[in-house]
Amino acid sequence: MEEILNYIGGKLLEPQSNQYIDNYEPATGSVYSQIPNSDEKDVAIAVEAAKNAFPGWSNTPASTRSAIMIRIADLIAANLDTLAAAESKDNGKPVSLAKSVDIPRAESNIRFFATAILHFASEAHIMENSAINYTNRKPIGVVGCISPWNLPLYLFTWKIAPALAAGNCVVAKPSEITPYTAFLFSKLCIEAGLPAGVLNIVHGLGASTGNAIVSHKSVKAISFTGGTTTGAHIAAIAAPMFKKLSLELGGKNPNIIFADCDFDKMIATTVRSSFSNQGQICLCGSRILVEKSIYEKFKTAFVEKVKKMSVGDPADPETKMGAVVSEAHMNKVLSYIELAQKEGGKILTGGQRVFLEGKNKNGYFIPPTIIEGLDENCRTNKEEIFGPVVTIAPFDTEAEAVRIANSTEYGLAATVWTSNLNTAHRVAANIESGIVWINTWLLRDLRTPFGGVKNSGVGREGGFEALKFFTESQNVCIEL
Ligand code: NDP
């Protein structure tokens, strides 16, 4: 069985303990590779390699760093099919999605920051006739990047690209549930000639490997994407060491649909915003609020479309809904569907595990599930489920929709459907979230600030925000 290896100091290495963890294929429920069960010894070696590489990398001209990163992006593009197939097998997502979204976006992430660093400038503050201040933005040193399983290579590269472009050396950990494309990526970094130790990828469990990265005193900043509880734990370790922190956490995103919207476009997009990647995107809209006058029309059209979405083998290019990521996650999602029914919810479609035939008979499949009739304050409507499950409910007034939208502890993203510009701007301004999409969903410009408010996170990724996070600002003041 294939062994995934750590990437440390430019080499592919076995874990010091020689211990491995089983890696499952969600669509079959079987083990297909072995992941290093790394511990603090592997992390210490990786941090040492990163420290040794830092003087060289931080003093390498930005144009040279950029050229190396562009070679990595080119290699991702050249290996699109292999990477997409690997992502689909490791995560359970349809190969068509991995090929059209995950891998192209991983390539864009690297390419974007490889060029953004060439345009990164800092400010000068002139004190008339007395002094000039300028801001010197210096790379931080060794930084830690920890990413989740839902968009494995996509979110992994979203973190490491700005860190590397800004001149830092990185110790990174992908989710142990989906490590495979990060392993393939380490081989591409070697092929592209990334100097040894600049990027180190240590595989293993969050509680051991992840914790060791966060706790290491030489790791000066942590960029983390994952669950809110894990984020709180990481913040508690990092704060007393005064590490810089960027936390992209969970969500419970509202999708507010007004009667005056473009109905057909809204329905087509709402199917995607609810169930893309089996609903396992932090930006999926899971609470759908519909203006009462079109509620029944919406319900009929939405349920009809969703009933036609069948789950299938993710490796089949025609499949639109694949497997959820793990058995544990499948059971968590199913337990929320059960809870929703106890809370008085009515399942309009989906609701039970699906068993496919043949090689997929033990796969973790849940059909797209729509629930109505729930109180806005019940647990199903408050807690993040992170699966193919949405609730729908009618609202009477804009004020009521905004109040319900803001009634969870999360504030990551919201979607608003209306053809009235005033409504759109007003609702966007009143919604407590880091991102608001109007008449669209998941349309991303990598230059924009990305992140959440409330329990959805601290800090912003994207564009120059990310380059600012991965640098320390120094004020230099010269008296004239
Ligand atoms: P987790 O918080 O469980 O894990 C995220 C990463 O942190 C994994 O690599 C995990 O490792 C690691 N980790 C776990 N415990 C620790 C620890 N004590 N110290 C350091 N690292 C640790 O999240 P999931 O992987 O389950 O991802 C789903 C969550 O991510 C959802 O809540 C989702 O909303 C959120 N998310 C947020 C996004 C955003 O941009 N705001 C985007 C995408 C997802 P391991 O897997 O090995 O345990």
Image: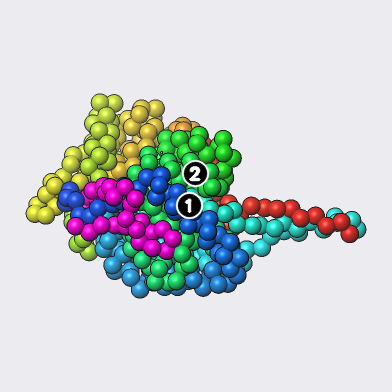
Q: Is residue 419 left or right of residue 141?
A: left
Q: In the rendered view, tell whether residue 110 sits above or below residue 386.
A: below
Q: Can you give x and y, in whole percent of width and height, for residue 476 in the image?
A: 76, 55
Task: Determine the image quadrant of residue 332.
Answer: top left
Name the residue: 23% across, 48% down: 22
Foreground residue, 436 or 460? Answer: 460
Q: In the figure, 286 relative to 85: above or below?
A: above
**In the depicted view, which residue is nearer to us: 195 or 469?**
195
- Residue furthest to the right in view is 129
Going from N to C along the chain, the mark reached first, 1 or 2, is 1
Q: Mark 2 — residue? A: 216
Q: Nearer the viewer, residue 56 or 393?
A: 56
* Residue type at tag 2: His
At 48% from the left and 67% from the top, the residue drawn is: 195
Quadrant for ligand 1? Answer: top left
Whether residue 92 is visible to the viewer of this picture, yes or no, is no
Q: Left of 310 or right of it: where is 470?
A: right
Residue under pointer 1: 47
Q: How is the image coloured?
A: rainbow
Visible residue check, residue 142: yes
Q: Position of residue 1 (x, y in %)?
A: 19, 57
Magenta highlight range: 1-25
Task: Name the spot of residue 467 as percent of width and height, x first.
Answer: 58, 57
Residue type beneath disc 1: Val
User: Which disc number belongs to residue 478?
Assistant: none
